Image (tube, rainbow, N blue to C red):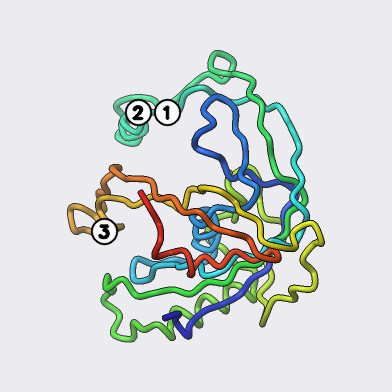
């Protein structure tokens, strides 16, 4: 049963990349957003350990168009231990882009527009505030969406592809769905998200200095897009590992 504390937003962007995990060397986007990418986008606006964001529907309004680009990327990343050493003043965390640079191709989506319907559930990880409730988090989320506030820049799959606009709406105008998206479209097997072993709770039980497990398993599902609408809630029970 869907929570009564839900919202609908419209999201626009110039470029988007929802990477297919089976494509190793070059980045190729799915035709439509992954559920985990949309959850991450919403968490950029508001998230607390006490709540879990749950996406119920994704509506694709703009026609699916791809563009190929080449980008200079860095082949390696700075190890966490190097960052920790620099913070302690016992080492340095640096890489030289000129030595690690490589050129990679990417197949991206362009000129995207999505509608996202979501709600949140309480996780049981309450803070010390006595007024912790669904209503409180719902009102905070609404206020931040109305004011255009966010903790970090919301993105469409990859961080470099920022959202250009987020709008809170009462309902979706499905007449705006492009004609090319009409009918029943089988999207094939898609990545739903990752199930982390720690369940989002610090393994040391300390939210002030949390230690999380990096162990996770991928979850997949096979959705159909009907007239531009992906009813994520309908497929949630059929997710496979």
Q: Residue at x 66, y 47 (%)?
A: 16
Q: Name the mark on residue 78.
A: 1
Circle 3 residue: 201
Helix, strand or loop under label 1: loop
Q: Position of residue 167 (x, y in %)?
A: 69, 71
Q: Name the mark on residue 82.
A: 2
Q: Position of residue 164 (x, y in %)?
A: 72, 56
Q: Callout 2: few (<14), some (14-19), or many (20+) C-alpha neighbours within 10 Å?
A: some
Residue 180 or residue 36, whichever sits in front: 180
Q: Which of marks 1 and 3 precedes in the sequence? A: 1
Does 129 appear above or below 91? below
Badge 1 vs badge 2, beta-carbon distance below 8 Å: yes
User: Would residue 13 appear left or right of 52 to someone viewing this image?
Assistant: right
Q: Position of residue 48 (x, y in %)?
A: 39, 67
Helix, strand or loop under label 3: loop
Query: If the image is split into quadrants, where does the N terminus sit?
Result: bottom left
Marks 1/2: CA–CA distance: 7 Å
Does 177 appear above or below 198? below
Residue 54 or residue 76, whichever sits in front: 54
């Amino acid at each position: 049963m869907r929570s009564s504390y839900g919202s609908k937003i419209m999201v626009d962007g110039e470029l988007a990349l929802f990477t297919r995990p089976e494509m190793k060397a070059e980045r190729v986007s799915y035709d439509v957003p992954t559920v985990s990418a949309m959850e991450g986008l919403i968490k950029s606006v508001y998230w607390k350990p006490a709540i879990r964001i749950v996406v119920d529907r994704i509506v694709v309004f703009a026609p699916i168009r791809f563009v190929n680009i080449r980008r200079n990327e860095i082949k390696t990343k700075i190890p966490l231990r190097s960052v920790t050493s620099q913070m302690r003043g016992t080492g340095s965390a640096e890489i030289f882009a000129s030595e690690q640079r490589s050129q990679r191709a990417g197949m991206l989506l362009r000129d995207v527009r999505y509608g996202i319907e979501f709600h949140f559930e309480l996780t049981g990880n309450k803070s010390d505030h006595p007024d912790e409730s669904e209503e409180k988090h719902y009102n905070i989320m609404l206020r931040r969406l109305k004011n255009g506030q966010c903790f970090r820049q919301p993105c469409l799959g990859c961080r470099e592809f920022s959202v250009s606009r987020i709008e809170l709406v009462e309902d979706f105008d499905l007449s705006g769905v492009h004609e090319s998206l009409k009918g029943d479209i089988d999207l094939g097997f898609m990545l739903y998200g990752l199930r982390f072993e720690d369940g989002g709770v610090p393994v040391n039980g300390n939210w002030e200095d949390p230690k999380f497990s990096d162990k996770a398993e991928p979850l997949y599902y096979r959705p159909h897009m009907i007239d531009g609408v992906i009813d994520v809630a309908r497929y949630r029970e059929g997710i496979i590992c």
